[in-house]
Image (cartoon, rainbow, N blue to C red):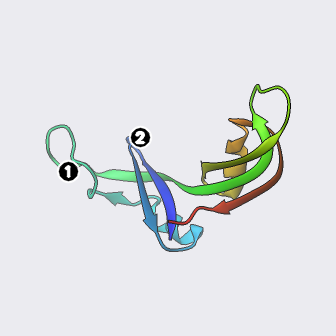
Amino acid sequence: MRTIRVTFDDGDTLTTNINGTEAEIRAYYLGQVSDHYPDGPDGREVLRKAVKVEFWYSALFIGRKVGAIGAFYPIHAHVWGEDIKAAELALYEKYDHIQRLILEPRNA
């Protein structure tokens, strides 16, 4: 079971768990219009279209936080990404000099 975050066209997100491959999960959500999510401000159901699906990844590596000076150290972090490459790139927003990266899907 994979942990995912679905972003809708109005900017709202839904975090949930689902079985399937990344391709199957994307096909299930992307472009689908649904009214099964929180009601609008006037109390009526709002139709929302899924525009992005991100997957939760677990990362283990040697590195340091951006801007840190000195030694490198082992880091265990979690990161969202539309695929494994996007998740790897997202790590560089918080960490520098990433070495020996092990990046795996985070299962529920």
Q: Quadrant of residue 29?
A: bottom left
**At which x and y percent is residue 5?**
48, 53
- Nearest to the observer: residue 22 or residue 65: 65
User: In terms of secondary structure, where does tag 2 sit?
Assistant: loop
The residue at 68%/35% (across/down) is 94
Which badge, 2 or 1, is on the more N-terminal residue?
2
**At which x and y percent is residue 87?**
67, 50
**At which x and y percent is residue 83?**
65, 57
- Nearest to the observer: residue 68 or residue 88: 68
Residue where numbered disc 1 is placed: 45
The residue at 35%/58% (across/down) is 33
Position above or below: 51 against 3: above
Q: Tell how many labels.
A: 2
Q: Residues within 10 Å of mark 2 (few under 14, many from 20)?
A: few
Q: Residues within 10 Å of mark 1 (few under 14, many from 20)?
A: some
- Nearest to the observer: residue 63 or residue 104: 63
Q: Is residue 72 left or right of residue 54?
A: right
Residue where numbered disc 2 is placed: 11
Amino acid type of the residue tagged 1 in the rendering: Glu
User: In terms of secondary structure, where does tag 1 sit?
Assistant: loop
Amino acid type of the residue tagged 2 in the rendering: Gly
Q: CA distance from mark 2 to mark 1?
A: 16 Å
Q: Is residue 59 left or right of residue 13?
A: right
The residue at 38%/43% (across/down) is 12
